[in-house]
Image: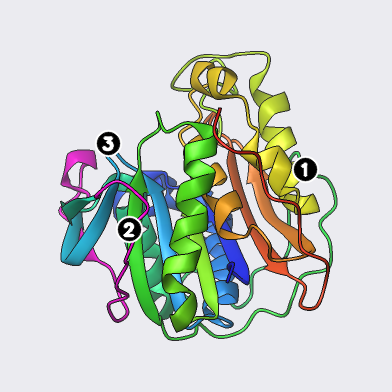
Amino acid sequence: MPAVRAALLPHPPLLVPDLAGGAAAELDQLRSACREALASVLAVSRAVVVIGEGPVWGVASRGARGSFAPYGTDVEVGLPGGPLPLDLPSLPEPVRLDALPLSLAVAAWLLGSLDADADADGWAAAEPGHVPSTAGAAEPAEPVTSPAAVPSLAAVAVPSALGPGAAVAVGRELARAVAASGPVGVIAMGDLSARRSAKAPGAFHPAAARFDAGVARAVAAGDLHALATLDLGLAGELMVAGRAVLQVLAGTMEGAGALHGRILYDDAPYGVGYVVAVLTAAPGTKRQAAPPQAR
């Protein structure tokens, strides 16, 4: 059974206010959008799979910790929720991750902050569905609700070198592995291009904004084929950290029927493309065609 709802989030360490220092308020809008997307997934899910970029194909162990010390603050995080076993016989044996990579550590911090910081960051009062930059006018948003309890949860890391077809296959298998515990929700942690401006980590590239806009359009349209066929070479040139994650996400929702996408945030405040979005399967609709196989 495919996932019923998914959230796409970025994972800059500056989402942790202790790291941002005096610039913490600059990302309040992004934090609010991330929390709204997470709450939307948690509200309909009994089993959640978190997907992030990492150095190897791996599954986070129960008790795995993430540290933001390499980024300048002595903050440690762990994944909330109960354990969600993953039986993945058709995939290579994953590495057991006792240390969370940055993408999963940011996911853990955001999940852990839903209750603690919602009022302090003005989440409940945030303007739902606001899009600061390139995505245009947002569709009407669902009502913002109180954070739901984190259900059973598993977290996996996929390397950026994973090919498109293999990434889709990983997503398909992840959804199958947890279907019995469902309804299944997905949290996909993926930055877009890191070359949107002259001060971006990879300096300016004229194709960066166009690539990111294409991803936002695909998510808004629920177009899994477009996500599954993102260009591997161009994504590498643009330093897209979330390309493989996006394609795993496509696999998790394969066969879910018509998808409704909702963009909550689309901007590049530090020259890196950040999109926050929610993808929801419409029950009883025709199944989507499968994304392409590996090439």
User: In what quadrant of the picture does the N terminus appear?
Assistant: bottom right
The segment highlighted magenta reads 67-93
Residue at disc 1, secondary structure: helix
Residue named by callout 1: 217
- Residue 18 % position (x, y): 29, 54
**Residue that appears at 69% across and 66% down:** 256
Residue closer to the observer: 73 or 277: 277
Judged from this view, the residue extending furthest toward the front is 90
User: Which amino acid is tagged 2?
Assistant: Pro
| Helix, strand or loop: magenta stretch | loop
Image spot of residue 42 (x, y percent): 52, 78
Contact between marks 1 and 3 (CB within 8 A): the answer is: no
Numbered circle sitting on residue 38: none
Looking at the image, residue 117 lies above or below residue 289: below
Residue 69 inside the magenta-drawn segment:
yes
Q: Which one is in front in this view, the residue at disc 1 or the one at disc 3?
A: 3
Which disc number belongs to residue 55? 3
Q: CA distance from mark 3 to mark 2?
A: 21 Å
For label 2, count other residues whose C-alpha is less than 10 Å away and answer few (under 14), some (14-19) or many (20+).
few
The amino acid at mark 1 is Arg
Cα–Cα span, label 1 and label 3: 28 Å
Callout 1: 10 Å neighbours few (<14), some, many (20+)? some
Q: Secondary structure at mark 3?
A: loop
Q: Secondary structure at mark 2?
A: loop
Neighbor class of circle 3 (other Cα within 10 Å; few <14, some 14-19, many 20+) is few
Q: Position of residue 169 (x, y in %)?
A: 50, 47
Label 1 vs 2, first from the N-terminus:
2
Number of numbered labels in the structure image: 3
Q: Nearer the viewer, residue 280 or 24?
A: 280
